[in-house]
Amino acid sequence: MIELKNVSKEYEGGVKALNRVSLKFTEGEVVVLKGMSGSGKSSILSLIAGLCKPTEGEVVVDGKHISKLADHFATSFRRENIGMIFQKYNLIVDLSVQENILLPLVPLNLKNDELEKRLNRELERSNLVSKKDIQVKKLSGGEQQRCAIARANSNNPKIILADEPTANLDEKLSLEFIASLCEMKRENRTIIIATHDPLFFDLDFVDRIVEVGYGKIV
Amino acid sequence: MSRVINFYLLSYSIGSLKREKYKNIFLFVVISLLVALLASTFFLSNAMKSEYNTLIDTYPDIVLQNQKAGVAATIESSIADKLLLLDGVKNSEARVYGSYYFNHADSELTIIGVNMFTPSCSSFINDLMQKHSLHRGEILVSSNVKNLFNNYYYKEYFNFIKSDGSLKKMQIDEVFKNSKNFFNKNTLVMLKSDARDIFDYKEYEARDIAIDVANRDEVVSIALKIKRLYPHMNVITKEDLQVEYENLYNFKSGFFLTIFIISFFTFFIIIYDKLSGLNGEKRREIGILKAIGWRVGDVLNAKLYEGAILSLSGYLTGIILAFVYVYLLNAPLLKNIFLYSNNLLKDYTIHLSVEYETLALLFFLSVPIYIVATIIPSWKIATLDADEVMR
Amino acid sequence: MIISPEVLTIYIIDAIFILFASVAFVISVRIVKNYDVNATTALQYELEKKSYLVATIIRCLFYIKVPFFLFFIFILNNISFVLPGAMCGAGVVNSSSAAVPLLFLKLLNSYLFAYWILLDKDDMSIESQPYIKQKFFLYLLFYLLLITEIYLEFSMFLNIDITSVVDCCGVIFSHTDGSYMAQFFGLPASFYITLFYGNFALLLLSYLVKSRYIFALLNLIFVIVALLSLIAFFGIYIYELPTHHCPFCLLQSEYNYVGYVLYSLLFLGTFNGVVIGLHLFSVDVQKEKMRYSLIFLMLYVSTISYYFLGYYLKNSVWL
């Protein structure tokens, strides 16, 4: 379903993040990318999401050559197929919970009732119904995390990409997050988690652990 | 087909404007003040233009002026009778009028000389003479002038100082209502013989000859005929005057426009600068939006919406401010630039006269220019690399 | 030469147009030369980013140009008060040799820019971007037209002599004048009625047949037929004066600014009609454009007929 073929990524200033990496993920698979910070695992996620282009090689997601699409189309693809969860939640802290959850849907210009439906579904699932009008910066860390997951889910993505999702969470919240991942797995989504948190390394629902180091698969 | 305007995007833009309150309030205030300033000058100059136009409407179709050494000189009254014989000329009049400087009050008065029984070329005078009668040594004054005279205790009569220094005492006979037009406000009317006496004109002299034409389409050809008869004199048609005033006021407001444009461009450089220099927080926000599926076009639209909201509301506020300033407050300070400060004109109230092109012109100078000025900064924002949020 | 705040505004907006259109031009040249969808070079990414800038600039220019065109005509009418002899915009147009080509060019450019925006929209909906080079190449041509238009505009305002007497529309569009215009006015009313309504009937027919080329061609012809019959024939029913043939007086307040409505309807209708001949849209979009074209033109025809028949109903006599 997702395939990286001989991909290299070099950032401005000559920093080589990935060096001829080839990887494959199948549908419904949960994969953990394990590695130190700077090992290139975040770059893999960026490339799959079409957030940046490889310097070399090809990225194919769901039959589409993501790396060759213009930004416009890569983004369209992303918003239909990929949900992203970031290290620092990456919510817009001045907006309310529901505004944050709806943010991915804004450019779609959907009808009101469709929007309502998706919002309520995500609010209920993330247990944030009572907080929907509260600014995100007034929420606790766990609530922010749940809000970020709700946002990633709001466009019904097939693929979930999580970048160091538990780096800022304590153990209790981390376990909560893992529980919600487990639920997503049940919905048959493809999940890729880039992390160096040992909590992820012996979970029973994780299908595969791939170790990344110095821009290569170890 | 999706809706033309994406209201969710619009409300995101409004929210985004609110989140940077101080910066945007500053931009809004500057836009509305600049628009208000220019709109006020335009409203005022439009008001003056329409005053002149109503004044010129009362003017004769053609005026014949004598010239000596390039300056206006007196003309022989008898020419009026000769012109009457020309085909197409309805009426002609040797006019005796001029301004008189009233020393104590530091005011210019306009003296108009009339004949009791021959019709004048001015509808204003004809109307007046239907209602009032005049005798030698009497003057008719406007209520404005009457008040002025009262202030200096000239209740019954007024002393004019002639050019040889002697006094001419005139009885204040009747008062007529102020003309609506402010250029007619400081008028007094007397017989032509009295006026000649005050201006030191000889019996056969007049200031100029006014000619009314039966068919307006013939004005130009009759003016040419008169010019052929009196090649050394100056023939001025009503339309010439209209064009002249129009140009004068266009020039005056053009001057303001130039200042305005300079200030506006300075302002847009500031905007450009402000929008280009993004802080880390904002960069991250754009990165997030792109990561969760906003295309370049969506971010650009959001930014353009922001610009449109800001400039449109600034424009509207500016126009409203100008309305209040000019028509409700009567344009304090600015009025003095446009009107020479004459005591008699102090109570002049500005009549509402709004021209659509002024509103359109100000619109084009503020809203689209602002939006265009934000294109490049917005584009720079919208094409930031989204993967920054991952680092 | 004429200096008024309105004309100064036109100069300023024009200057901004030149600036931004030129930025877009330079980028377009690079895109036409170097764009390669399959490349993964830094240059390609840069060009891709810049292509969004060009599209945005062109879109903004167009959306400003349209109301600005109306403003321009409004100003022509206003300047006529300063020009001795002129009664409406026609006198101003007639006073400068640049004016007639300028008007045609403005009209043409409005159609072309609107076309470009549609082309861009279509291009951005297909992942392989099949029209990318075509659209930027077209823009290079449109840019030259735009610059010519602005040049003509400058030279028109610079050359208007406010001291010389010009003709009013009554003279320019007179029956007796020996000009080419006069020959059109001599044609009988039935000619114009047949031409106008006949053309429209054919349009309806071709809508049913759904042939995009015929529909577009008929629309193109309709632009000319509608304008000609408006000046020569239908206009007199709006003015209620058999000798008044002027495309500009319609835009004045005496006639409730009806000209702006008429010209806008005509533009929207014919543009949607003509563009489907120039570009192959998806079936749905094509249907939609045809429908829009027909709706706007129907409104145009009804408005014209309202004046034309309304006059007869009121006065039971034809002009």
Image (cartoon, coloured by chain):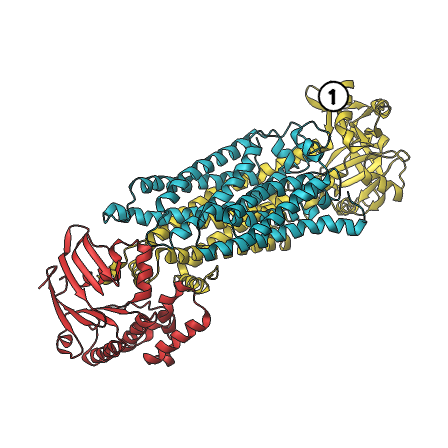
How far from the left and from the top, in percent, is residue B282? 32, 60
- Left or right, C296 with respect to A95, comes to right
Whether residue A18 is visible here, answered yes or no, is: yes
How far from the left and from the top, in percent, is residue B185? 74, 43
Colour assigned to chain A in the rendering is red
- Left or right, B176 with respect to C5, comes to right
Residue appearing at x 80%, y 48% in the figure: B177
Colour assigned to chain C in the rendering is cyan
Quadrant assignment, res B300? bottom left
- Quadrant of the drawing holding the C terminus of chain B: bottom left
Instruction: From the viewer's side, name the closer residue of B214 and A126.
Output: A126
Image: B229 above or below B275: above
In the image, which lettered chain appears yellow? Answer: B
- Left or right, B88 with respect to B235, comes to right
> Which SS class for mark 1?
loop
Instruction: From the viewer's side, name the closer residue of B168 and C241.
Output: C241
Q: Which residue is mark 1?
A: B233
Whether residue B132 is visible here, answered yes or no, is: no
- Residue type at mark 1 is Met
How far from the left and from the top, in percent, is residue C24? 38, 42
User: Label 1 is found on which chain of the structure?
Assistant: B
Residue appearing at x 63%, y 44% in the figure: B46
* Residue sticking out furthest to the left: A218
Quadrant assignment, res C93? top right
Q: Mark 1 packing: few (<14 Cα in 10 Å), some, or many (20+)?
A: some
How far from the left and from the top, in percent, is residue A199? 15, 77
Instruction: From the viewer's side, name the closer residue of C299 and C52.
Output: C299
Residue appearing at x 12%, y 78% in the figure: A202
Instruction: From the viewer's side, name the closer residue of A137 and B380.
Output: B380
